Image (cartoon, grey):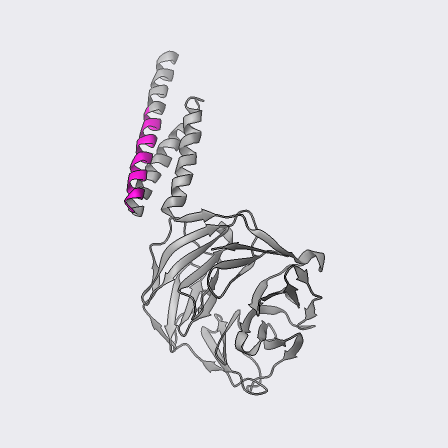
Amino acid sequence: FIFSFESTEKKELRESISIAYESLEQAETFLLQGERIKAQEFLDKAYESAQKVAKGKSKLFRSDLALILAQVEDKQLQVENAKKVTPNLVTDLGLKEDNLRAQGILELKGNYYVNDAKKVFKTVSNIVEKGLSASEKETIMAEASRPDQNLLLYLTNGPRIIENKEGVITPMNTADESWKSGIDIRTYGRYSYVLDPVNNQIWKYERKRTNYSSAVAYSDGTDLSRAISFSIDGSIYILTDEGTIMKLFRGKKVDYDFKDLPSNGFSGKQLRLHTTAELDFIYILDPENQRILVFVKGDRYATYKKQILYGDLDVRNFSIDELGQKVHILTDDKIYNFSL
C-alpha cells in the first residue's frame, strides 16, 4: 500500500513537471510573437504546476523544480519588459551628516541638492557641502525647482514656501494672510502649484517680483483625497495611493488612465510620479517593489513600457535627468544612479 501511494505520487509529480516544461515552451513561443498576455497565461500555468511539486512532501524532481522556477523568473522579466540593474554609488551623504534621514532630491545646473526635514545639502560630484538650515521651527514637506531662475523651492508645514537661491535661504510671503498647506509642490513657468488633498485642491501661486500672489484654486472639484504625488507638463498628472492616475487640464479632469499595467501592480503612500514638458514618458518610483516604472505619455493613456529593478535599497525619492536617460535614487544617506 505504501509503495503504491509513493508510486502514484511520483507519477503525479512527473506529470506536474511535464506540464510546467510544456507551459514554458508555450510562453517562449508567445514571447517571440510579442503576445505578452498569452505568454503570461502560460507562465502562470508553469508556476502553478511547479508549486504542486514544491508543496509536496517528496524530494523528487527538486533539480527540475529549481530549473523551472528560474526560467519562470527569467521569462517573467521578459514579459514585463523588466531589467535588473546594479546602481552606482555616487555620493555618501553620511560622511557629512550623521543619522541623516534624507527625503528629497533635486537637480539644478548639474548639481544635486538633497534635503531632510530641516536642512539642504548641495553635492558637487561626490563632494557634500555643509547643510543649510531651511527653517529652525518648520519641517520640509516637499521640494521643487525653477531652473530658469536658478531657484529651489521648499514647501514647509508652516505652511510656507522657502526659496534657496545660490545658497541664500529666503522665507517667502504671499498676498494672503497665510499660505495654503500641502504635501507636494511643483513649478511651471512663473507659477508654483501646491497639492492639498485635505482640502481637495491644487493651489496655484504666481511668483511676483518680491513675493507670491494670493492662492488660486486650480481644480474644479476633482476628488484629490487620495492624491500623493503630481507633476506638470502643461497638464497636471496626479498619482493616488491606490496606484491610479488622474489628469487635469486648465483645472478640469480629462479622461486618463494607465494602460497595459504589469502583473505586479503598485500602491502605497511612498509612490512618486515624475514628468516634464520635455519628457515623453511618465516615471513612477515604487519603493515597495524596488523599481521604477516607465509609461509612454499619451493624450488618453499612460501606456506601460518597461520597469527597472534596482535591487535591495530603501529608496526615498528619485530624480530623472532632462533627457530621460539617467535616474538618481536617494536612500537615507546616499545617492545612486543608473541608466534607463
Is residue 236 visible from the viewing direction of this image?
yes
Q: Which residue is nearer to you in this view: 137 or 110?
A: 110
Q: Residue at x 38, y 30 (%)?
A: 52
Q: Main secondary structure of the magenta part?
A: helix
Q: Which corner quadrant of the image does residue 90 belong to?
A: bottom right
Q: Position of residue 340 (x, y in %)?
A: 47, 55
10 in relation to 136, above or below: above
Q: Residue at x 52, y 86 (%)?
A: 213
Q: Which residue is nearer to you in this view: 272 or 67?
A: 67
Is residue 269 visible from the viewing direction of this image?
no
Q: Would you say residue 336 sits in the magenta stretch?
A: no
Q: Which corner quadrant of the image does residue 166 belong to?
A: bottom right
Q: Position of residue 140 (x, y in %)?
A: 61, 69
323 in relation to 1, above or below: below
92 in relation to 62, above or below: below
The number of discs equals: 0
- Residue 189 placement, left or right of 173: left
- Residue 161 placement, left or right of 8: right
Q: What range is drawn magenta here?
A: 15-34
Q: Would you say residue 16 sits in the magenta stretch?
A: yes
Q: Position of residue 170 (x, y in %)?
A: 65, 79
Q: Is the N terminus in the top left, top right, bottom left or bottom right quadrant? A: top left
Q: Which residue is nearer to you in this view: 282 or 56?
A: 282
298 in relation to 249, above or below: above
Q: Position of residue 65 (x, y in %)?
A: 42, 29
